[in-house]
Amino acid sequence: MVTASASQAVATVKTRVSEIAAQSTRLVSVDVLRGLAMVIMALDHVRDFFSYLPFEPEDLSHTYGWLFFTRVITHYCAPTFSFLAGTGAYLATTRGKSVPQLSRFFLTRGLWLVLLEITIVDFAWAFVFWPAAGVIWILGWSMVCMALIVRMPVRWVGIFGVTVCVTHNLLDRISPASFGKLSWLWMMLHVPGGIQMTPQFNFYNLYVLIPWVGVMAAGYAFGKVLQRPDRRKVVLTLGLSMTALFFLLRGFNLYGNGVAGQSFGFPFSAGPWHVQATTTLTVISFFNTLKYPPSLQYLLMTLGPALTFLGLFDGIKAERGIGRILLVYGRVPLFYYVLHLYLIHLLAIAAGRLTHQPTAFLWHGGMFVLGIAPGYGHGLPFIYGVWALVLLILYLPCRWYMKFKRQHRDWAWLSYL
């Protein structure tokens, strides 16, 4: 009995030591940056559900400064998610996960995310079956690809990722029509748009594999940088260099911002910048880079500052205040993502009822399927207020789930949520 008790005690100590080691190797700065992206992302989605404006914030013929800022600040979210998904996967190998285990995890979690996108996530947007490929979709397929890519040496994973991000704009002039019956495949890979599956059924593909898989691969290789003792200096240098390269390419209208007119029906999102009638519109034109698909300039404009912030966050403990709040959101990203969509959609219905606006369309397709109903919508001050309310409501359930995951590390299936 004594021997058995002693063995059990030793096993308990080993388990606890292992947990402490895992926590100590987890970089708080990565979670805080991810949490910041989650917070900003919610603003864009609140705007989607609450705005009365029938035009996109990037449309230079209608937009204005505050509206464009509300949109462009959220451009930082998707690249940060994808990049840090790769980084987090690499860091998992430093906590004992083998490459074969990581490969299997990428494959299974990627397929799970694809399924989640076309069911629970798509339903959250419209409350009807509305097949669309959003950010969860492309994160999933990028992970499926990464299941093979991570079997290469880390150096080659990084070379692959950076090469895809830098060179993919060379493919911009290739039309899906040139592939004939396989045009849908090129649209899945590089040209966003509506893919007609049947005369009555379209699949709306917003996020394409190229270059998003390259962003995740680059993030995976970047994880090795975070193991360096001088990582803060290296990350800051990299972030500032990428930002400077953006201003160089964009300032002289050089390579890397797509072809005007090929952006999922948003021709105003692509092409070179020009001096406009006002200073505000000129600034908007300058920062109006192509997101669908993400051009090299777009990736430099977003990932450069993101990595700069990551370097500034290095060493942060996030034990209280805003840092703690961001840490909570950043450690339960998928839980937060799904929850925030349903919350925003329901708040839109509640706000519409309280302000005597039409809400029936929000139950059966909403603005994403039916467009904005006449008489519906709110201004930016109201939108920012709802955004703050959403973050406030989400904090407690996210904190609970973060603690729940920490207390049940042995439940492997929780890593998929």
Image: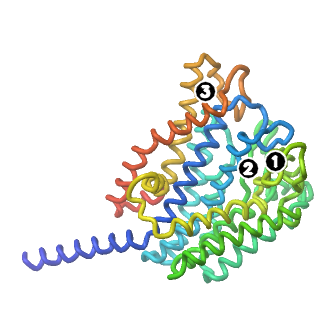
Residue closer to the observer: 44 or 259 = 44
Task: Looking at this view, name the residue that lies furthest to the front.
Answer: 279
How far from the left and from the top, in percent, is residue 145? 65, 67
**Which structural element holds mark 2?**
loop
How far from the left and from the top, in percent, is residue 206? 73, 49
Q: Determine whether label 3 and label 1 are within 8 Å by CB.
A: no
Query: Residue 264's mark?
Result: 1
**Which structural element holds mark 1?**
loop
Colouring chosen for the image of the structure: rainbow
Q: Amino acid at mark 2?
A: Leu
Residue under the point 65% across and 63% down? 305
Residue under the point 90% across and 61% down? 174
- Does residue 29 lie above or below 396 as drawn? below
Question: Which quadrant of the figure has residue 317?
Answer: bottom left
Local packing at callout 2 (Cα closer than 10 Å; few below 14, some 14-19, many 20+) is many
Q: Earlier in the sequence, mark 3 or mark 1?
A: 1
- Asked if residue 235 lies left or right of residue 2, the reply is right
Local packing at callout 3 (Cα closer than 10 Å; few below 14, some 14-19, many 20+) is some
Q: Amino acid at mark 3?
A: Trp
Q: Determine whether label 2 and label 1 are within 8 Å by CB.
A: yes
